[in-house]
Amino acid sequence: MYSGRLVFSQVMAFFPLSAFRQCVQRYRGNYKVQHFSCLDQFLCMAFAQLTARESLRDIETCLRAMQPKLYHAGIRGQVSRSTLADANEKRDWRIYAEFAQVLIRQARKLYRQDDFGVQLEETAYVFDSSTIDLCLSLFPWARFRRRKAAIKLHTLMDLRGNIPCFIRITEGKTHDVNLLDELLLEAGAFYIMDRGYIDFARLYTFTQQAAFFVIRAKRNLDFTRRSSRPVDKSTGLRSDQTIVLHAPKASKDYPDTLRRISYFDTETEKRFVFLTNNFVLPPLTVAQLYKCRWQVELFFKWIKQHLRIKAFFGTSENAVKTQIWIAISIYVLVAILKKQLHIDRSLAEILQIFTVSLFEKVDILQLLTKLHSQNESDHLYNQLSLFDFWLSG
């Protein structure tokens, strides 16, 4: 793959340019644009994500310092913070949202056969949300509380590859359970959720559409036990029951039977109670599925730590959504690169390497693979030197 190109250019070689141009054309992103195209905008924002820039001035200063290399990086327009700010404010964020979906579809195909730690042939998803706090005086359109602004990032993640396949950005005060109405349920798939998504009328829709859910029960659940099955308590299981809801409204919203599984986690010393509409899976597998829910928490933590979505480069709703969707695109693009090049590194490690090497002319495969073995050798050499020093003393 290496042909004397910059690392940044090699990364963007995984970028489906024709699909991006179709998204731009669909929303007339380059209408009356002469010097700073949507592609220039995306590449500048991608540079900001991959190198952890903190502001528009930071982006401008760093890119202008690399001016002789910008053409080879694919950036044709003149980079200035005012031009980039205008692009983020005015160009339709849906361009980047639709392009992210293109990358997501590509990534899911690559990770389709990956193991996620649970013996399950069906697709398993985790659905959750994360709140991103904002300054109310700068983001008045995102009012959350009296003196606080925020937005929510609602994410449905495919556990095979940890790829986000459904994302909605809403106001911070939007209740999580309302987003269940927007999911296109897949028959036979499993949806893992926390107890904040308990709405039995909406959960009954899963059963009607032949989809399965695993959700943590609330403590005050009013139910009647129909039957119980024996469990191996040495595994942490405490009970496996068939129940029906007893409360008038809940029993009307969900008239069918449910499965209630109680599990004690020895690591956290906490007791969990799960509800599911699947009566076939072993009870321990249900508990293991719910444990996979932490993957979406790691995604939120990862994207907040490693991508620029907490310090925004614009204050309008369009600028914020543009930045988030480009951040997600970069996350998925790095996941595609990792899979296609068979890189045995975490996404965080790959980003750390890119942070300091984007404008170097080095083979990306060599950069991401041989550096690891070199670091191990250096570490071993340092240990031996210290050991020899102690012996000589």
Image: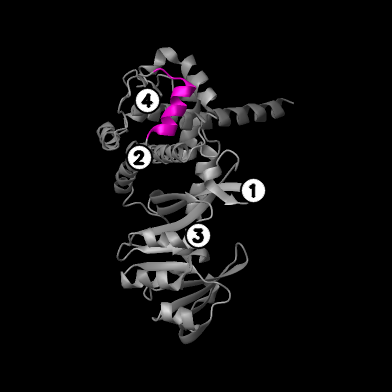
Secondary structure of the residue carrying numbered label 2? helix
Q: CA distance from mark 4 to mark 3?
A: 36 Å
Q: Which residue is mark 1?
A: 147
What amino acid does circle 4 point to? Asp
Instruction: State whether residue 79 is above or below residue 104.
Output: above
* Label 3 Cα neighbours within 10 Å, binned few <14 / some 14-19 / many ≥20: few
Q: Is residue 180 magenta?
A: no
Q: CA distance from mark 3 to mark 2?
A: 32 Å
Location of residue 212 in the rendering, given as x and y in whole percent from the top left corner? 37, 68
Instruction: State whether residue 226 is above or below residue 47.
Output: below
What amino acid does circle 3 point to? His
Marker disc for residue 175: 3
> Which of the pair 292/391 is nearer the observer?
292
**Magenta stretch in the rendered image:** 78-91
- Of labels 4 and 2, earlier in sequence is 4
- Of labels 1 and 2, earlier in sequence is 1
